[in-house]
Structure formats: C-alpha cells, structure tokens
Amino acid sequence: MCDFKDKVVLVTGANRGIGRSIAEQFAVLGANVAVAARSKQNAEAVAEELGGGAAPFVLDVDDVDSIAACVKAVLERWGKIDVLVNNAGITRDGLAMRMKEADWQAVIDSNLTGAFNCTKAVLRPMMKARSCCVVNISSVVAAMGNPGQPNYCAAKAGLEGLTRSLAYEYADRGLRFNAVAPGFISTHMTDALGDDQSAALMEKIPLKRLGTGEDVAKAVIFLASEDASYITGQVLHVNGGMFMG
Ligand code: NDP
C-alpha cells in the first residue's frame, strides 16, 4: 500500500511547513522527491536532510521561466514527473475595503496562477507517462470564507475550481486532479496568530488541536496513491471537524 518506489514527486514550497512534511512523507515511502524551493540553499538543506531519492531544485511559482527551468531539470534527472503537489502559497491579509491592489494580486498570483502555471508545465510529460496526478493544497477557507482574507479565500476557491476543470479535461489521458483543504495547521503561516486568535480558533475545532504537516501529508499521499485511482476532481478536508461541508 502507498509504495512510491520509482515514482517522481515534485513538491513546490518544500523547504518548510506543510510542503516539507509532504516531501518527507513521500521520501519515506521511497519516492524520488524533487524538493522545490525559491532559495537554492533551502532546497539543498531539505533534500540533504531527507536523503534517499530527494534532490533540490530552485522554483519560484511567480516566475514562468523559473517553473519551466525547474520542470526541465526534474525531467532531465528522472525522465518523468508522476506527482505534482502545488503547495507553495502566501497570505497578505486585510479587510477588502483597505486591501492594497498589490496584496490582492500577490496572493492570487502565488496561490492560484502559480499552481496553474506549474500544472500547465507538467501536463505534456504527464500525458505521455499516463497514470499521473496533481494534488493542490487549498484551504478550509475556500469553502467557509474568512473575514480579512478575501484575496486568499478567492485564490483557494479558484484553485478548487481549477482542480475540477482539469479533472474533466485530462481524465481520458489517465490524469487525476484533487485538492486537500487543510484547516488550521501549525506552521510558520499560523505562527502569526495571536493568543486570543488561537484560543478563539480552538473553540471552533471539535478535535481540539491544530493540525500538523503530517496530517496534511497523509491525505496528499492517499490521493496520490494507487488506492485513490478512482478519485478525481475532489477536495479532501483535513480540519479536525471545524468545517464538515
Ligand atoms: P509556510 O508559510 O510555512 O510555507 C509556505 C511555503 O510556500 C514556503 O516554502 C515558501 O517559500 C513557499 N512559497 C511562497 N511563495 C512562493 C513562491 N512564489 N514560489 C515558491 N515557493 C513559494 O506555509 P504553510 O506550510 O502553512 O502553507 C503551505 C500551503 O498550505 C499553502 O498553500 C497554504 O496556503 C496552505 N494552507 C496552510 C494552512 C495552515 O494553517 N498553515 C491552512 C490551509 C492551507 P519561502 O520559504 O521561500 O517563503
């Protein structure tokens, strides 16, 4: 079950947080993991820590040339990409009436356009290889909305729509597209929450804890595995029960 030996997995934003956990879990299961990060040093450090089949690649999802160069380098090294995990993302929170155009655009660019461009770059090699898949990291707020995050909620809701559209477009080529929507996960992104915000949050989580990167990684592994071969166009929520659909 969930054997990724000889599989090639590209994880964006793999140098920390959820992306690092995802890269680590795939590495444990024997995959060749392309640890993609904006900084060469960060990518190298994580690839070295993971060992085995992990290798570092530079990737800025805001830059189409960087995406093309990264995909080319991964294909040169391993000849294929079986799994793409679009994990890289940012927040630039603020109420809509005060939100700067640049903050709106940056969040749409990294979380949505970046994922689209990374996916577009792997589509041809994936269609050639068949039986490949993409897992997008969305967020619970795509479905719930969140005051102070109109840009982020719009980007993640867009990512889920993109996931479903691509699932239709490439099903007959053997490709699957799914998303994982984490709730609140303990990472650099949630470190920014104050004590009051964290306490209020805990009230809303029936399982009474923040999630971990590993909780998210396990859902990603499942969707990328053969066990999920009949699942496409879906969003899997990993949120301790704070949103049940
Ligand atoms: P972190 O802030 O800890 O990590 C974000 C990662 O994305 C970093 O590796 C960062 O690289 C990378 N990144 C940001 N912008 C770019 C870019 N332009 N090109 C390449 N890499 C980039 O966040 P999390 O680990 O918490 O979040 C990971 C994903 O999970 C995101 O998509 C986020 O939206 C989603 N998510 C997180 C939740 C949470 O509670 N933590 C909840 C729901 C969803 P660098 O180190 O260079 O900045």
Image (tube, grey):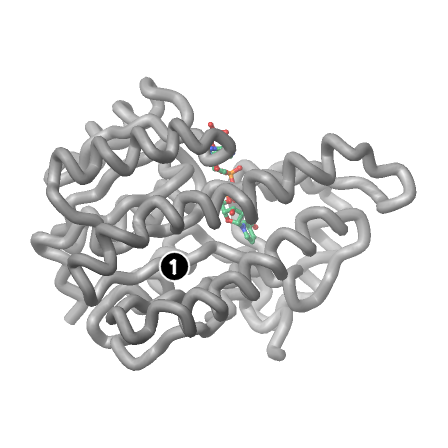
For the point 69% across and 50% down, the residue is 198
Task: Give the quadrant of residue 36.
Answer: top left
Is 26 on the left or on the right of 231, as rendered? left
User: Is 101 situated above or below 41?
Assistant: below
Query: Which quadrant is home to the C terminus?
Result: bottom right
Q: Which residue has dot 1 on it?
A: 135
**Tag count in the figure?**
1
Percent of width and height locating residue 81: 21, 49
Q: Position of residue 152 (x, y in %)?
A: 67, 49
The answer to whether 61 appears left or right of 175 in the picture is right
Q: Is residue 94 above or below residue 169?
A: above
Q: Residue at x 49, y 70 (%)?
A: 164
**SS under mark 1:** strand
Point 18% across, 66% down: residue: 2
Q: Which residue type does callout 1 highlight?
A: Val
Instruction: Give the percent coordinates (x, y) of residue 30.
Output: 12, 51
- Does label 1 point to a residue whose CB lies under 8 Å from ligand 1? no
Q: Residue at x 46, y 35 (%)?
A: 61
- Disc 1 crowd, CA 10 A, few/some/many (<14, 14-19, 20+): many
